[in-house]
Image (cartoon, rainbow, N blue to C red):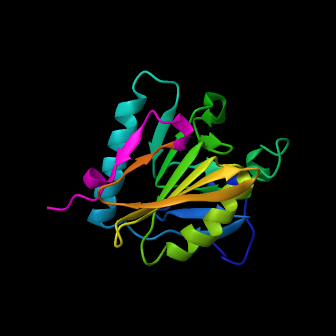
Amino acid sequence: IDINKRYTFADYLTWWDDKRRELINGFVKMMTPAPSRRHQRILGEIHFQIKSFLKKKKCEVYVAPFDVRFPSSDNNVADNQIYTVVQPDICIICDESKLDDKGCLGAPDLIIEIVSLSTVKKDVEEKFNLYEESGVKEYWIVQPNDETVTVFHLENGKYQHKGIYTRGSKVEVGIFKGKLDIDLDDVFFTK
């Protein structure tokens, strides 16, 4: 795979090796090897709290690896016309028409990325811009080392900073309008 060449989701589907990749505007972005144990612990706890809330509700929560495809327009939904596919750490999709056997086609309602030193630039800059442009309603950036969660809500096509939260806080999941708060004492619990 040539990292300087532009690819589509159709190309992505032909790569049958054990390497995880994302495509952003057609260009390959290699993903890091398996995340740290702390990363997995944080991901698991956030997922558990969301999954428990969503029982018997129409929204669904997924964890990586799970492909989210962003078509360049509503008319370009064919695999060979999609140039962006990412694998967010956690995503919630409430419009089931966006779900198929390949993952999600279109913007999830909420995306959560848990950053590491090797992914912070991509998650804070590239993916922030991508998710904003693609219409993801809510974006969380979780910093395990600082034990913080930074929350953004999409308003009039631009992300608005809603706050930075840490231990001792509960973070409201904005897409559910006050019905679900994530307890950060449980998320950042260490033994």
x and y percentages locating residue 52 in the rendered image = 34, 33
- The verdict on residue 66 being magenta is no
Q: Quadrant of residue 187?
A: bottom left
Quarter holding the C terminus is bottom left
Q: Is residue 110 above or below residue 179?
A: below
Q: Is residue 127 above or below residue 85?
A: below
Which of the pair 10/52 is nearer the observer? 52
x and y percentages locating residue 134 in the rendered image = 72, 52
x and y percentages locating residue 149 in the rendered image = 43, 60
Residue drawn at point x = 30 percent, y = 60 percent: 167
Residue drawn at point x = 65 percent, y = 49 percent: 136
Extent of the magenta region: 174-191
Q: Residue furthest left?
A: 191
- The verdict on residue 178 being magenta is yes
x and y percentages locating residue 16 in the rendered image = 53, 57
Residue drawn at point x = 42 percent, y = 30 percent: 54
Quarter holding the N terminus is bottom right
